[in-house]
Image (cartoon, grey):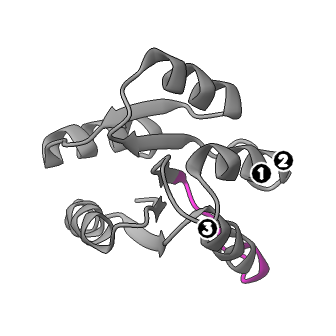
Amino acid sequence: MGSVLIVDDSATLRASVKFSLSEAGYAVEEAVDGRDALRKLQELQTRGGQVSLIISDINMPNMDGITFIREAKQMPSFKFIPVLILTTESQDSKKTEGKGAGAAGWLVKPFSNDQLIGVVKKFVR
C-alpha cells in the first residue's frame, strides 16, 4: 500500500484519519498546516521517501490548504502527487479554487470511514 500525508490543524481529525487509513494498510505521515506539510515533504524527499497521496484541509493557520497545494505543485517531485481536499467547505467557488490549485478530489466533513477509504483507493492502490 502507499503512503499518505494528512494535513490538518485538528489533532483529532488527523488521529481519526490516520487510524482509518492505517487499519486499511496505508502508511500515514501527519502535518499540522501547509508550512509543516512542505517541510515534511522535503524531509521525505531527502530520505528518499515519497507519498502517494496528500489529504489536506483548506482552513488552517500559518499556511492554508490552497496555498500549500499551489506551493507543493511547484516542486517537481510533488507536481504529480494527487491531492484530496478534506474540509467543511462545500461551496462551488472553493471547489473551483481547489481544483485550480491542483486538487484532484474533494471530501466534505463529516465523512464516514467507508467514504474516506473509498476515495483514497481511487488514488492509491
Task: Identify the residue shown where x is 37% and y is 43%.
Answer: 87
- Give the residue at mark 1: 71
Q: Neighbour class for label 3 at 10 Å: few (<14), some, many (≥20)?
A: many
Front position in the image: 79 or 66: 66
Quadrant of residue 109 in the image? top left
What is the residue that sits farthest to the top in this orientation?
A: 92
Give the number of the disc on residue 39: none
What is the residue that sits farthest to the front in this orientation?
A: 61
Q: Neighbour class for label 2 at 10 Å: few (<14), some, many (≥20)?
A: few
**Residues at marks 1 and 3, CA–CA distance in whole angstroms:** 10 Å
Dot 3 falls on a residue whose secondary structure is: helix
Q: Are marks 2 and 1 in contact (CB under 8 Å)?
A: yes
Quarter occupied by the N terminus: bottom left
Question: Is residue 124 positioned above or below 99 on the image?
Answer: below
- Give the residue at mark 3: 37
Residue 20 on image: x %, y %: 21, 61
Prevalent SS, magenta region = loop
Kindly identify the amino acid type of the residue bearing the numbered disc 1: Glu
